[in-house]
Image (cartoon, grey):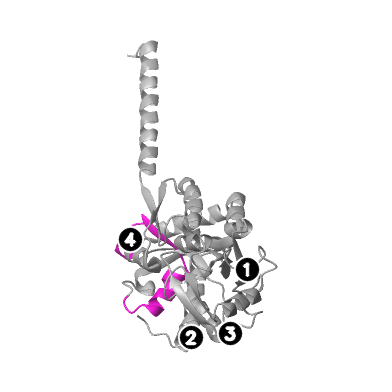
Amino acid sequence: MTPPRSRRRALRWLATLALTIGLAAGAQAQGSKTVKILVGFPPGGGTDAIARILADKLKDELGHTVIVENKPGAGGQLAAQALKAAPADGSTFFLSHDHTISILPLVVKNPGFDSARDFVAVAGFATFANALAVSGGTPAKTFDEYLAWLKSQGNKGAVGIPAPASVPEFLVKLIGQKYGMDLVAAPYRGSAPMINDMLGNQIAAGVGSIPDFIENQRAGKLRIVAVIGPHRQALLPEVPTFGELGLSGFEDLPYYAVFAPAGTPRAALDSFSAALAKVVAMPDVRERLTTMGLAVEFMPQAQITARERAYTQTWTRIIQASGFKPQ
């Protein structure tokens, strides 16, 4: 017997409602997953800002909540240890530059992780340059003027670095050796507290990344006087490279990349990599990262893995030649 028309309408309405509720529940279930991006430095620094720019867009591409979790301390060592302990299920990633992945294992006897064994590269997305900047408390506007100022201070001074036993520390050591200066590298827990002290004229100079310094450089609060790399930076065409100043060995630019715990399923790695590729190709994201001093360059897993290994080999030679002994 055919149901009355009103009943048929009611049944169709109920079926539509059930379908709508089912779709909503499915969407809610899909969006209920939280993807965590670990950052090894405090809020307010360059790495933290980069992570938050990407996380804001990744949530739409991945269809999940994406949060940035800061685990500052020991140059990213604590964040790396947290990544090692995290489940390898695609829920936890680590956004890092070269220091934690390539340099820490060379300078710390027991960092609590083995980059090659415990982590897998997901993708790289940028390179950048480290730089030497001087605070407003010094009269120096160029590298030569900074050296002249140091001479007026008895050929000695302190230079801030974002982490101990880092590329900035080796750079400070080599500057001191080349120019006969007694320079002491003063380690901080990230670039943000270092820059705060520079702005307060508590320390006269610091070595960090251009993304860390660029906003205060533009505001005239700090002055970048030299950069690493094979050529001058587009954002700072007036600033010479260390190679131009006679300090060779700092031509290989460091990288930014995302890593996951070893054993993370290939599907999760590919999903995150594809989402990251789309995000860094977005004009607004690329503009923001470029303005911060990054050279945006998406590097799939094989490319960033090869780059990281080559970079590690370069710094193995530099660190061994310096006579530095792992602590």
103, above or below 87, in the image? below
Name the residue tied to disc 2. 317
At which x and y percent is residue 280?
Answer: 56, 55
Tell me which residue sits at (44%, 88%) in the image. 323
Determine the secondary structure under disc 2.
helix
Residue bearing the label numbered 3: 179
The quadrant in which the N terminus is found is: top left
> Magenta span covers which residues?
83-110
Q: Residue furthest right?
A: 238
Crowd around label 1: few <14 · some 14–19 · many ≥20 (10 Å): few
**Discs 3/1, front:** 1
Q: Amino acid at mark 3?
A: Tyr
Between disc 1 and disc 2, the foreground one is: 1
Of marks 3 and 2, the one in the foreground: 3
Q: Earlier in the sequence, mark 1 or mark 4?
A: 4
Q: Is residue 177 above or below residue 127?
A: below
Depth-wise, is mark 4 or mark 3 nearer the camera? 3
Report the number of discs.
4
- Disc 1 secondary structure class: loop
What secondary structure is found at the residue carrying circle 3?
A: helix
On the image, numbered disc 1 is attached to which residue?
A: 139
Bin the neighbour count of mark 2 within 10 Å (Cα to Cα): few under 14, some 14-19, many 20 and up: few
Q: Mark 4 or mark 3, which has the lower sequence index?
A: 4
Front: mark 1 or 4 = 1
